[in-house]
Image: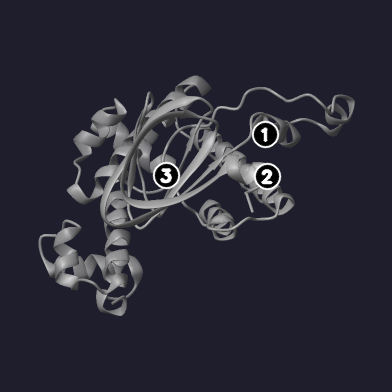
């Protein structure tokens, strides 16, 4: 039985070991499991793994590639034209406006394009859709409800970005917005290069900020220093490797960039509250 129009146009559940493509597509959210996919757009470069997701705006040109020894599963959702604007209007306008002009679409929505560490809200919804659609046909009414719920959660995440930006110590809104965009570029750089032990100077350069300004503002925006963010990324990657049981803790320590097992052991226990052996 062919997939209904909504599923065939909006849900892409794929997978493979290597892939490259160049495209211009509708508003979408990208998610992966089992490895990392790298995107390039006019706004920058992004590494998307199983603990993060990426929104690309409508008609944003991009390339994607990955080359992995293990199978990478992808879950990508393309939202129908006008959905984001209509749903955002429901969230932002008073009921009187919605009643007086129910057919209006609303102003254009442009998401901040940055890799977002998952807080349990987006990936769980993506996996629910993936489980229902991979290799089978999901009921159209159920899928429409799930996609609207996912899009609404993405719109709320966009508002969280705006709120975080306005909490930064800068004189005016335009400056705060620009500072936050630069900090996100720096975080994207740290996210992509965490296993290579990126320096503060390199991350600050990616943000077009001085190292001192970057360090101070990064912690104000994200609640942790660049070093803490990088170490957390390395340790979470180590935990995933340990959970597979395919390698030793000593090998994992070297793979994620620790010079000795003892330093890895101490950092792992400090971060997760138990030693690496408890994950094996």
User: Disc 2, disc 1: CB below 8 Å?
Assistant: yes
The residue at 30%/79% (across/down) is 278
Residue 106: give x, y in percent of width and height: 71, 24
**Dot 1: element:** helix
Extreme front residue here? 1
User: Disc 3, disc 1: CB below 8 Å?
Assistant: no
- Name the residue carrying label 2: 148
**Image vertical order of residue 273 relative to residue 189, above or below:** below
Horizontal arrangement in the rendering, residue 9 relative to residue 20 (left or right)? right
Quadrant of the rendered image containing residue 207: top left
Horizontal arrangement in the rendering, residue 258 relative to residue 58 (left or right)? left
Residue 68: give x, y in percent of width and height: 26, 52
Looking at the picture, the colour scheme in use is one colour
- Name the residue carrying label 3: 222
The residue at 32%/71% (across/down) is 243
How far is disc 3 from disc 1 in space, using C-alphas?
Answer: 30 Å
**Dot 2: element:** helix
């Amino acid at each position: 039985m062919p997939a209904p129009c909504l599923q065939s146009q909006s849900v892409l559940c794929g997978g493979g070991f290597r892939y490259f493509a160049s495209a211009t597509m509708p508003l979408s959210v990208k998610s992966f499991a089992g490895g990392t996919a790298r995107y390039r757009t006019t706004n920058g470069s992004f590494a998307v793994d199983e603990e993060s997701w990426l929104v690309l705006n409508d008609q944003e040109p991009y390339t994607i590639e990955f080359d992995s020894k293990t199978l990478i599963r992808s879950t990508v959702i393309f939202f129908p034209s006008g959905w984001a604007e209509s749903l955002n209007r429901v969230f932002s306008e008073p009921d009187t406006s919605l009643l007086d002009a129910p057919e209006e679409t609303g102003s254009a929505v442009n998401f901040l394009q940055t890799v977002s560490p998952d807080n349990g809200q987006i990936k769980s919804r993506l996996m629910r859709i993936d489980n229902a659609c991979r290799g089978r046909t999901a009921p159209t009414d159920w899928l429409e409800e799930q996609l609207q719920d996912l899009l609404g959660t993405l719109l709320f995440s966009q508002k969280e970005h705006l709120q975080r930006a306005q909490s930064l110590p800068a004189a005016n809104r335009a400056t705060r917005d620009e500072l936050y965009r630069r900090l996100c570029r720096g975080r994207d750089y740290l996210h992509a290069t965490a296993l290579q032990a990126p320096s503060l100077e390199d991350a600050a350069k990616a943000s077009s900020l001085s190292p001192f300004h970057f360090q101070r503002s990064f912690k104000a925006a994200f609640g942790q220093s660049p070093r803490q963010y990088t170490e957390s990324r390395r340790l979470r990657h180590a935990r995933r490797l340990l959970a597979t049981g395919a390698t030793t803790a000593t090998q994992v320590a070297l793979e994620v960039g620790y010079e000795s097992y003892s330093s890895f052991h101490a950092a792992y226990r400090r971060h997760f509250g138990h030693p690496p052996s408890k994950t094996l």
